[in-house]
Image: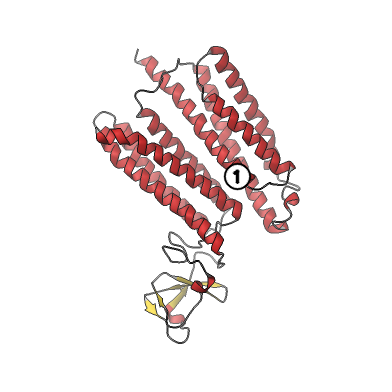
C-alpha cells in the first residue's frame, strides 16, 4: 500500500523533471551550447566538467585518467590509459577522438550543457523509482507496472538519442527526433498518472469531443515538428549572418516557416471551436482554458520573434509553451477516454 501511496507523487515529480529537461534543452539551444560537452556521457572525459581552458591543455607532471581529454592543435585528444605526464608531450599516451572533429571549449556552453544532462539524469532516476513503486500494482493492474518500466526504457532510449545528437554535431533531423521523444515520454507519464488515479472526475463521454481533442493534439505535434525545422533554419542563419543580426535571421525563410505560421491559425481556430463546443454542452473539460491560454502566449511569442527580431528568451519560451500545450491536450484526451471506459462498465 505504501508503494501505491507514493507512486502518483513520484510519477508527478518525474513529469516535472522531464519538463525541466525540456526547459534546459531549450536554454541549450538558445545559447548555442549543444556541443558544450563534445563527448557523452561524460564531459571532456570528466564527471564534473572543467571550468577553465587550462584544464584542457597538456601540462607536465599532471595525472590523467583514461578517457579524459585535452585540446591540442585544435584537436580533441583522449587519454588511452591512466598515467602521469612527463616533461614533454608523448603521442603514445593519447588517441584522437573519432566521433567528430569538434574541439572547442567554452566554459558557459559546457556548464549549460552539463546542467541539461544533470536534469536528464535526475529525471531518469525518478522514473526508475516510479518503476520500482509500480510493482505494487502488479496483481491488480499490470498495465501500470508494464508501462512504468517502458518509461525507463524510453528514458534510456532518449539518453542514447542525446548521445547521437552530440556525435552528429547537432544534426537537425536527430534534434527533431530527440524533441518528439521527449513529448512521447511526457505522454507516457501523464497516462500513468491518469490511470493510477481512481478518484479522478469522470466526464460524460462524447465521441465528437474525443475526435476533436485527438485532432488538436496531432495538429500541435505537427506544429512542434514544423517549429523545430524553422528553428534549425534560424540556427543556420545565426551561423551565417551572426548573432547580432537578428533582423536577418528570418530573411528569405524556408517554406516550412510559412506553413508553420499559417497552420498556427488553423490550430487556434480549431481549439477555439472545441472550447465553444465544451462551453455550450457544459461537458466540464475545464483544462481547455489552459489550452487557450497557452495558445495565446504561443502566438504572442511567435509574433514577437518575427516582428521584434527575437527578443531575449522568446525562442525557449515558445518551445516550452508548445510542450506544455501538448501535455494539457493529451490529458484532455485521457479524460474523454476514461469517460468512455466508465460508460462501458455501466
Q: Is residue 36 visible?
A: no
336, above or below 6, in the image: above
Tell me the element at label 1.
Answer: helix
Position of the C terminus, as image quadrant, is top left
**Mark 1 surroundings within 10 Å by alpha-carbon count, few (fewer than 14), some (14 through 19), many (20 or more):** many
The residue sitting at 49% across, 52% down in the picture is 116
Question: Which one is in front, 57 or 9?
Answer: 9
Question: Which one is in front, 26 or 182?
Answer: 26
The residue sitting at 67% across, 36% down in the picture is 300
Q: Is residue 245 visible?
A: yes
Q: Position of residue 303 (x, y in %)?
A: 70, 38
Question: Which one is in front, 211 or 312?
Answer: 312
Residue 64, image quadrant: bottom left
Horizontal relation, residue 139 to residue 54: left or right: left
Q: Position of residue 102 (x, y in %)?
A: 56, 65
The residue sitting at 49% across, 78% down in the picture is 58
Q: Position of residue 167 (x, y in %)?
A: 51, 59
Tally of marks = 1
234, above or below 83, in the image: above
The residue sitting at 57% across, 13% down in the picture is 280
Q: Position of residue 100 (x, y in %)?
A: 53, 65
Position of the N terminus, as image quadrant, is top left
Horizontal relation, residue 6 to residue 262: left or right: left
Horizontal relation, residue 216 to residue 262: left or right: left
Which coloring applies here? secondary structure
Task: Look at mark 1 in the image and give the residue it sits on.
Answer: 228
Amino acid at each position: 500500500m505504501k508503494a501505491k501511496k507514493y507512486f502518483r507523487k513520484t510519477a508527478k515529480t518525474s513529469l516535472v523533471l522531464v519538463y525541466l529537461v525540456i526547459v534546459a534543452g531549450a536554454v541549450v539551444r538558445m545559447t548555442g551550447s549543444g556541443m558544450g560537452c563534445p563527448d557523452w556521457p561524460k564531459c571532456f572525459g570528466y564527471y564534473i566538467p572543467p571550468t577553465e581552458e587550462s584544464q584542457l591543455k597538456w601540462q607536465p607532471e599532471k595525472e590523467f585518467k583514461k578517457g579524459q581529454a585535452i585540446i591540442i592543435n585544435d584537436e580533441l585528444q583522449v587519454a588511452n590509459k591512466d598515467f602521469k605526464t612527463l616533461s614533454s608531450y608523448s603521442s603514445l599516451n593519447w588517441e584522437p577522438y573519432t566521433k567528430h572533429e569538434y574541439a572547442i571549449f567554452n566554459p558557459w556552453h559546457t556548464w549549460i550543457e552539463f546542467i541539461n544532462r544533470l536534469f536528464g539524469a535526475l529525471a531518469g532516476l525518478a522514473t526508475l523509482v516510479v518503476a520500482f513503486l509500480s510493482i505494487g500494482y502488479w496483481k491488480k493492474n499490470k498495465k501500470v507496472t508494464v508501462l512504468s518500466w517502458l518509461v525507463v526504457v524510453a528514458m534510456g532510449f532518449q539518453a542514447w538519442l542525446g548521445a547521437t545528437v552530440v556525435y552528429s554535431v547537432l544534426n537537425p533531423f536527430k534534434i527533431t527526433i530527440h524533441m518528439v521523444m521527449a513529448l512521447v515520454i511526457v505522454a507516457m507519464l501523464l497516462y500513468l498518472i491518469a490511470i493510477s488515479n481512481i478518484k479522478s472526475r469522470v466526464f460524460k463521454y462524447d465521441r465528437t469531443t474525443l475526435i476533436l481533442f485527438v485532432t488538436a493534439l496531432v495538429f500541435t505535434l505537427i506544429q512542434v515538428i514544423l517549429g523545430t525545422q524553422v528553428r534549425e533554419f534560424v540556427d543556420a542563419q545565426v551561423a551565417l549572418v551572426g548573432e547580432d543580426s537578428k533582423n536577418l535571421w528570418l530573411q528569405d525563410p524556408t517554406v516550412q516557416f510559412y506553413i508553420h505560421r499559417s497552420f498556427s491559425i488553423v490550430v487556434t481556430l480549431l481549439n477555439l471551436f472545441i472550447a465553444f463546443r465544451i462551453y455550450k454542452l457544459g461537458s466540464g473539460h475545464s483544462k481547455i482554458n489552459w489550452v487557450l491560454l497557452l495558445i495565446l502566449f504561443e502566438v504572442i511569442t511567435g509574433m514577437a520573434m518575427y516582428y521584434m527580431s527575437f527578443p531575449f528568451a522568446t525562442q525557449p519560451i515558445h518551445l516550452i509553451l508548445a510542450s506544455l500545450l501538448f501535455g494539457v491536450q493529451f490529458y484532455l484526451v485521457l479524460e474523454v477516454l476514461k469517460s468512455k471506459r466508465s460508460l462501458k462498465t455501466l
